[in-house]
Amino acid sequence: MGPLLAGAGALIAMLFVLALDHIDALRNAAGRDALLSPAMTSSFGLLVAGLSTETLGWVATGGPVWAGLMVASLGLVVAAGYWLVKRLIGPESSGEQGSP
């Protein structure tokens, strides 16, 4: 049952990341900035995968699925790491953002 739940959680996360990429493409076409950076999209994908696996585990088995909790925790740690690095380093200068 565990691999089936993990596979369903991964599928939900892939659809979530695909939806965020589609939203960013539409925002880019409209001349607006991206909603999330690719790194944050990936970390939120991990979070969604873990939480959906955990939720499906509670519904299907009535108990926790520890793999789901670990993946969700990993997503939170990665997101917190990106946030901390961005706070420590600061925003990029305009010269670093342009193409060479």
Image (cartoon, rainbow, N blue to C red):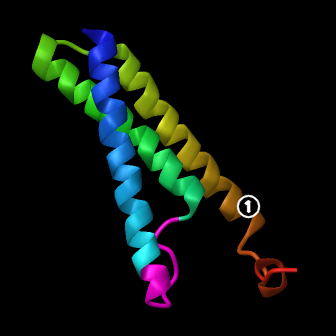
Q: Is residue 4 visible?
A: yes
Identify the residue at horizontal 56%, vertical 48% (top origin). 80
- Left or right: 49 in relation to 91: left
Residue placed at 44% from the left, 62% from the top? Answer: 21
Label 1, on which residue? 88
Q: Residue furthest right?
A: 100
- Is residue 65 something one can see in this rendering? no
The image shows residue 57 at horizontal and vertical percentages of: 21, 19
| Up-down relation of residue 61 to residue 46 (above or below) | above
Seen from the viewer's position, the closer of residues 10 and 55 is 10
**Magenta stretch, main secondary structure class:** loop
Q: For this view, does 4 lie left or right of residue 72?
A: left
Percent of width and height locating residue 87 = 67, 63
The quarter holding residue 18 reads: bottom left
Among the 4 quarters of the image, the one containing residue 30: bottom left
Q: Which residues are magenta?
A: 27-36
